[in-house]
């Protein structure tokens, strides 16, 4: 039972880790990013909304990644 729980948690960890990498890469650097991809951030009315949503998704994904890491560390030893 414990081995199966650890295996499921490892699968979740891999998926969440890859998604976290993708979401972080979508963030804007210095003057670029997701909002500039669709015609410039200044001219796009929803540009800041997109970035705020992306920030929230990144925070939730990072928290999930951290909690799953703590769970795996606790159960693995």
Image (spheres, grey):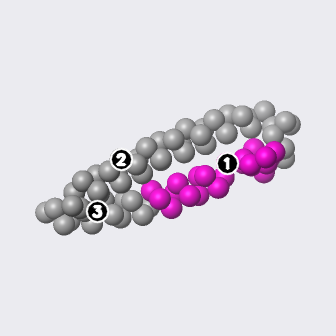
* Residue found at the far front of this picture: 77
Mark 2, secondary structure of its residue: helix
Work out whether 2 lies above or below 27: below
Q: Can you identify the residue that label 2 sits on?
A: 67
Q: Earlier along the polypeptide chain: callout 3 or callout 1?
A: 3
Q: Which dot marks residue 46?
A: none
Q: Nearer the viewer, mark 2 or mark 3?
A: 2
Residue at image coords 86%, 37%: 43
Q: Can you identify the residue that label 3 sits on?
A: 8
Mark 3, secondary structure of its residue: helix
Left or right of 7 on screen, residue 45: right
Work out whether 68 lies above or below 10: above
In this view, the residue in front, 70 or 31, is 70
Left or right of 20 on screen, residue 30: right
Magenta stretch: includes residue 17: yes
Mark 2 Cα shell of 10 Å, populated few (<14), some (14-19), many (≥20): few
Q: Main secondary structure of the magenta part?
A: helix
Q: CA distance from mark 2 to mark 3?
A: 14 Å
């Amino acid at each position: 039972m414990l081995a199966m729980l650890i295996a499921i948690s490892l699968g979740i960890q891999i998926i969440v880790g890859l998604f976290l990498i993708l979401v972080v890469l979508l963030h804007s650097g210095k003057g670029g990013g997701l909002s500039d991809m669709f015609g410039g951030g200044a001219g796009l009315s929803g540009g800041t909304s997109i970035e705020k949503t992306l920030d929230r998704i990144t925070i939730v994904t990072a928290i999930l990644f951290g909690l799953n890491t703590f769970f795996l560390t606790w159960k693995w030893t």
